[in-house]
Amino acid sequence: MSTFKQTASLEDYLEAIVILNQDGKAATVTAISKSIGVKKPSVEWAINKLSDAGLVVHKPYKDVKLTPEGTKIAHEVYRRHKILRSFLVNVLEIDPDIAEVDACRMEHLLSEESLKQLEKFMDFMLNCHPGNLVWHETFQRYLKYGDEDSELKARFNQ
Ligand SMILES: [Zn+2]
């Protein structure tokens, strides 16, 4: 596993619980450990931290439950994750598996300001802008053939 998995931030645990619950699965320590790819003692350590912060409740041998405050943060992280993943896959044409991992790294770092602007940019490029098909197709050609592509050269020199 990549190094970031071992240092998964506490937000990742909240996110993992939301995703498990959404899939109708109980957020047990084992399930969280599998979903994030860290060992159970690390999960237990993180859950204790989150419990101290009032974000989760964990009774022995039960699954981990989010408190209302934990739920709020978890949904916010997951919302960021989905926006970033969509940007990487649908705009930058990144492989979905890589996008998934990168989205999980980026979701903790971006300011709300940048994220909002990114969302608008995506909406503009993918939904509103009348030329969206042209730029998308052009970008795909560029990724495939580089700027030596004669059709692209012709377009840029128009
Ligand atoms: Zn994530």
Image (cartoon, helix red, strand yellow):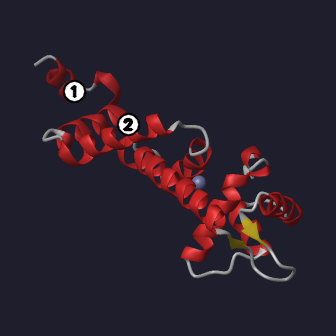
Residue occupied by mark 2: 117
Q: Position of residue 59 (x, y in %)?
A: 83, 79
Identify the element where label 1 is drawn. Answer: helix
Question: Splitting the image into 4 quarters, where does residue 55 fall?
Answer: bottom right
Give SS at disc 2: helix
Q: Which mark is residue 152?
A: 1
Q: Is residue 85 left or right of residue 43?
A: left
Point 45% across, 40% down: residue: 115
Q: Which mark is residue 109?
A: none
Instruction: From the viewer's side, name the closer residue of 59 and 130.
Output: 59
Disc 2 packing (10 Å; few <14; some 14–19; many ≥20): few
Examine the rendered structure and indicate whether residue 140 appears above or below residue 23: above
Residue ID at (77%, 66%): 33
Query: In x, y percent, where is residue 39?
Result: 84, 62
Q: Mark 1 is on which residue type?
A: Leu
Of residues 36 and 158, the one nearer the viewer is: 36
User: Within the displayed image, which quadrant is ligand 1 positioned in?
Assistant: bottom right
